[in-house]
Image (spheres, coloured by chain):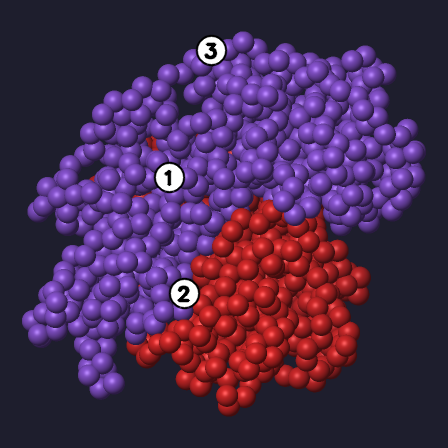
Chain colours: A red, B purple
Amino acid sequence: MNTAELVELAQQLRVDSVRAAAAAESGHPTSSMSAAELMAVLLDRHLRYDFERPAHPANDRFVLSKGHASPLLYAAYKAAGAVDDAELLTFRRLGSHLEGHPTPRRLPWVETATGSLGQGLPVGVGIALAGKRLDRAVFRVWVLCGDSELAEGSIWEAAEHAGYEHLDNLTAIVDVNRLGQRGPTRHGHDLDAYARRFAAFGWHPVEVDGHDVDAVDRAYSEAESTTGQPTVILARTLKGKGVASVQDREGLHGKPLPDPEEAVAELGGVRDLRVRVQEPFTSRMLHSVPTESLELPRYDKGEKAATRDAFGRALAALGTARGDIVALDGEVGDSTRTEFFAKEHPDRFFECYIAEQQLVATAVGMAARGWVPYASTFAAFLTRAHDFIRMASIGGAGINLVGSHAGVAIGQDGPSQMGLEDLAMFRAVYGSAVLYPCDPNQTAKLVAAMAGLDGIRYLRTSRGAGPVLYGPDEEFTVGGSKVLRSSPEDRLTVVAAGVTVPEALAAADTLAGEDIPVRVIDLYSVKPVDRHTLRRAAEETGALVTVEDHRQEGGLGDAVLDAFLDGRPVPRLVRLAVRTMPGSAAPDEQLHAAGIDAMAIAATGRLLVEEAVAL
Amino acid sequence: MNTAELVELAQQLRVDSVRAAAAAESGHPTSSMSAAELMAVLLDRHLRYDFERPAHPANDRFVLSKGHASPLLYAAYKAAGAVDDAELLTFRRLGSHLEGHPTPRRLPWVETATGSLGQGLPVGVGIALAGKRLDRAVFRVWVLCGDSELAEGSIWEAAEHAGYEHLDNLTAIVDVNRLGQRGPTRHGHDLDAYARRFAAFGWHPVEVDGHDVDAVDRAYSEAESTTGQPTVILARTLKGKGVASVQDREGLHGKPLPDPEEAVAELGGVRDLRVRVQEPFTSRMLHSVPTESLELPRYDKGEKAATRDAFGRALAALGTARGDIVALDGEVGDSTRTEFFAKEHPDRFFECYIAEQQLVATAVGMAARGWVPYASTFAAFLTRAHDFIRMASIGGAGINLVGSHAGVAIGQDGPSQMGLEDLAMFRAVYGSAVLYPCDPNQTAKLVAAMAGLDGIRYLRTSRGAGPVLYGPDEEFTVGGSKVLRSSPEDRLTVVAAGVTVPEALAAADTLAGEDIPVRVIDLYSVKPVDRHTLRRAAEETGALVTVEDHRQEGGLGDAVLDAFLDGRPVPRLVRLAVRTMPGSAAPDEQLHAAGIDAMAIAATGRLLVEEAVAL
């Protein structure tokens, strides 16, 4: 298209944004209108994309970091022929693929779910990094950001990561329309303020009038020809551009235009221009994904090993067997034990430094490119990435997250380092799997199994060495459990996982000595939970004690109850968990102080059995 | 002290750090040793602090953002005479105040709990902002950061906030020792790399040899005399400085020195120098905290109002009654309705832009200075600050957090904007209160009540207008509930909160028409939960249905079970919650699709009652 046609295309994108929001009676047309030229020029002149083959390895990747500008995205899909006008007008309605904020669950051209600001650029960095270091493909990643979202720290984690990795296949386009939701941004139209910041982080900044299609075209070309560093295009724009009654005005965020028909007329009416988006460069898949037989580490009974060690060794073995496994860490690989993977597969290891949001975002970006990421840090610090995990689940991303140093059992470091809320956080994530092994052989098997699941998979590991409870050939299914002690006379069931399993066994030994036979279940799959085994134990033994190195809310105890909350009779149950604020102390002192050691389990069990006699 | 004495003092801080970690057989002596001169010069020459009066309003505030360097902090306390040598050697032991990472729960001189990196500077910004705009006091805030933690996005949220607010009462001291936990940082000893970044964010950077006490002294003086912008002192240091076997070496993070006795000898032996820390400037408390009678907004039955509106109006009224109330928002005040407060009390309103970690950190900093903050954004986006909320609870901070736009009931915006995990997140926080009102009068009362609680208090508000169910003089206690329908013949109890309360009432009406009398409980206090009323309902009606606009894990349903998990018989229970991934749709369509509307409640109730007959 020539300049005049591009101008027309931009107007069409505005018109369709206004129409979509008007039809929905909600949405963000003014935030779409500011970026119309930025989108028009990208679509016609620079993006290389085959809409019929969204999985094409050489397709450029476009991420709408300012996800609320979805009308603009859908208007662009219409201009590219991927969506028709009738579908455009289903925007935000029940059952429509055109949701308020775009998600890959609904549309194959969307790389990642956005709508929580400050997440598109971090995920774009992950995709660009995959392009550079894994795919070794020629595609470019284009990320359209808002100016408001530059206040999010995650943007600067991404900026640091991209600058450091010299991601010249990445272009951030910032729609500097000066207005956030509530009012003006901190820096208004001061493009220099943003340029200074990005330049300091190693980016090439380009300032441009975002409504001048030729200038925007030149800026994109400059980005494409810049080597050795990512480019940020800082585009001065006006929110609501093109319609005088809303242009550059406050108080109009996230609302349809007051008079859509008049606005469409002011914008020159409805058009039906079609863009021929350029095809991707011809590309071979340069990376191969060799598959060898998996040889997991094996531990013999009598040994002691920490589950974090078993995780690290199993991940390294999995990486040997499968070429699509990648590992990422938040600068604590010597603690999480991803260092074993890093040593054996340095080309597929990604150091993300102490930036947990970018750690998870990089995993999401790599998963979008077909890789199978395992991202690790302390369980406690995964809370830093909670919103990224939430958004990853909305987008249907398949990622493995591994949190080490869980619970009070870490000992002296104290509560700041103890993951005590991680099970609750991950259980509440839609479609997640939550695994908490107690033994190194079990850990190894679960590390391999989780790679094959959908959605968010979480593995919780422990710092200290524990006994080997299972043989190396024992199998463990996600959604299963292991009954470690059982007899027809059992009067109580203790359900444990991770570090509390040996405590439960010790308590069962104590109670057995008092003629109280106790069933012990290792509930290593906290979600999905083994309803069958739990229900049977409840029926046969009458009462349950759950014991977990976690807060009482949302963890193992609540997971056990999931087996009974469909209206059936619920067993009597006592939930042992960490109810106090721990301090520094030795691991055994911590378990004792929290009331989750063998002594506490035995005392609780005794009481429950006595009460059952009294009832 | 003169130069030679300062050098000696720094050596003493090193020696005591080595000794403390040796006694504990754990800890971070090498991370302490790099910053010994930085601490010695601050303590002797620049900090103004009365250790006997930690609440003195003019005391400078010191925050150890690199919380793992706690041995250095405790060694400084010893040098200042606040802790004796015997206590120093209790480091990290059970019951000691000298925990692995410092917390104000244990020590009155600690401003905020640290240990999760990247949080001390953000909280320091909150304290400095309180000093400038609320206390209007002369104190300075000194924050000692590590270089590794500069990778955290939260540091740059803080840098942006402090630069924009011209916080010249704030000094960040960065101990650039080049080594993180696992190995070298991204930028090593490239102080210029950090200087460029901070300068771009509006800070005055000063580069210095961190082991040259005179140069450090000059740098601090430069910070004190810099006006209009915060200062960052970038100090080139060596990890493990002073002991050849560990100095500037990898693989020695977080470990006692291999031969502590030899190290102490190499450092010149044990000393017992005492520092006379300068007294704070004489200061009046310039802010007054007037108290007037509270006149909450009143809503009449028959009206409709959104709980977010009621929150905003109640907060503004509370701000009128109490001069110590402050409000903060994440650039969505027109949605959360803190705009009402901002309009009436602009001097006590703080716009934090789209930076939720800094939003919560600012609240924590202001709470440390005695203010009563209410920080608001969408419930969904509070997940962004999960780790800050966790650390705030460890530090015992008293803050109010308010999440709006909770649940699928927001409608068309779709899942990225829906808080569906917030109840689970906040319930798992130690000592938290979780409130979820359904009615504007109830909201107003709870907004006032939460100000008087300890710890983390969370209020969940809704977007859409709902009916007024309670009169304006009804009282609501935290930990209570309201029984909205009750008869001696009730065969079922429905427990609801927020938007599901009107649905529960409608379902009760439907079932009443089928001769199934149903009790309805409004469980507005999700934590603590009203055990007494729930237990009585279970005894009298036999079965419970819980219904919540939240994920099934960790929310209202699990809160109800908290009343029964001490071994007593548990009622039959069905938990209705959001089990699918919602899309865009109208609010009533969303409640229906999620199976949490009146129709779903009635159908479930019918089934439970029929089953009870069958049992």
Instruction: Please state the chain letter of the residue tagged with numbered disc 1 in the rendered image.
Output: B
The residue singled out by tag 1 in the image is: B453
Mark 2 or mark 3, whichever is nearer to me:
2
**In front here: A593 or A399?**
A593
Measure the C-alpha gap from mark 2 to mark 1: 26 Å
> Taking the image as drawn, is residue B34 in sight?
no
Say whether marks 2 and 1 touch (CB < 8 Å): no
Query: Relative to B315, is A218 on the left or the right?
Result: right
Which amino acid lies under the numbered mark 3 shown in the image of this protein? Arg
Nearer to me, A97 or B436: B436
Residue located beneath label 3 in the image: B284
Q: In screen coordinates, is A403 left or right of B262?
A: left
Q: In terms of secondary structure, where does tag 1 sit?
A: loop
Question: Which residue is rendered at x = 71% and y = 41% of the image?
Answer: B91
**Residue A228, position in %: x, y?**
71, 45
Residue corresponding to mark 2: B566
Left or right position of A356 against B285: right
Mark 2 to mark 3: distance in Å? 52 Å
Q: Nearer the viewer, residue A477 or B575?
A: B575
